[in-house]
Amino acid sequence: MENHLLVILPHPDDESFGVAGTMLNYKENGWKVTYACMTLGEMGRNMGNPPIANRETLPQLRKQELEAAAKILKIDDLILLGLRDKTIEFEDEDKLAERMRTLIEDCKPTLVITFYPGYAVHPDHDACGAVVIKAVASMPKEQRPTVHALAFSRDCIDDLGEPQIINEISRFHQEKLDALKAHKTQTQEVIRQTEIALQEGNDEAMDRLKYERFWLYSFND
């Protein structure tokens, strides 16, 4: 059976910030990689600098940016789930979890990566993680994929402990930067600040391009 990584996150650019090197690492090791993106990030506040989008054109531009990033990250299948940005928390959780379970059962992944609900800062992040976890929990134990969860909250270390999975991704740092740059309506300032920090030898900036960290989600049943 082919090993298969399924990443489920809510926005274009979430994959580049949090999972870029990890996806490339699994791909390098012969895994199939699928990214299911819940929205097109159409409510994003950034329009580029100088502006290259407006509120009407932003969704299509962000779709194009995501497709460009997916090529850089060698994603095999890019799935657009068509939900509306900044509204995932208001979706019917049971229905959306059922949809996620169908997606997971169709893809048959070995590993799922999503956000750790309650520890991912943005409401869309937390809601995405919650429905994915609910979907996996509803599956028979023997059919469940492993789940690795991203967490950013200041409380995550105190509450969850240290991340159990630390992926060393420094050999992919340029691809990660390039994927972030592909999301040009959203990331120009982040990239500018990151490149300045790298030139100055900033340890935190270097760490973000060297490691990606995840928590192993444990189901209680």
Image (cartoon, rainbow, N blue to C red):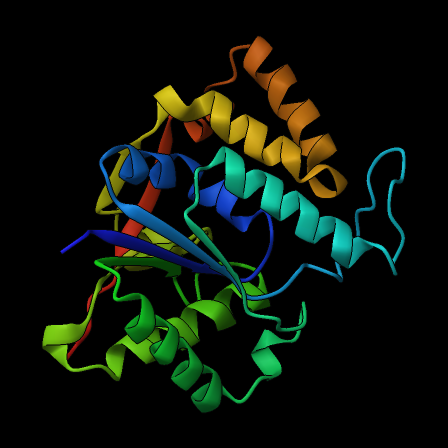
Q: Which residue sits at x=55%, y=27%?
A: 177
Tell whether 177 sits left or right of 33. Answer: right
How many numbered circles are shown? 0
- Residue 204 lies, in percent from the top left, at 48, 26
User: 98 or 75, which lies in front?
Assistant: 75
- Residue 137 lies, in percent from the top left, at 25, 79
Tell whether 128 sits left or right of 141. Answer: right
For the N terminus, which image quadrant?
Answer: bottom left
User: 52 or 205, which lies in front?
Assistant: 52
Image quadrant of residue 200? Answer: top right
For the C terminus, which image quadrant?
Answer: bottom left
- Residue 195 lies, in percent from the top left, at 62, 18
Q: Which residue sits at x=66%, y=60%?
A: 40
Query: Residue 86, relative to residue 184: is it above or below?
Result: below
Query: Residue 142, relative to residue 197: is it above or below?
Result: below
Image quadrant of residue 178? Answer: top right
Judged from this view, the residue extending furthest toward the left is 142
- Residue 210 lies, in percent from the top left, at 38, 25
Tell whether 194 sits left or right of 160. Answer: right
Image quadrant of residue 97? Answer: bottom left
Query: Residue 67, relative to residue 38: is it above or below?
Result: above
Q: Which residue sits at x=36%, y=35%?
A: 24
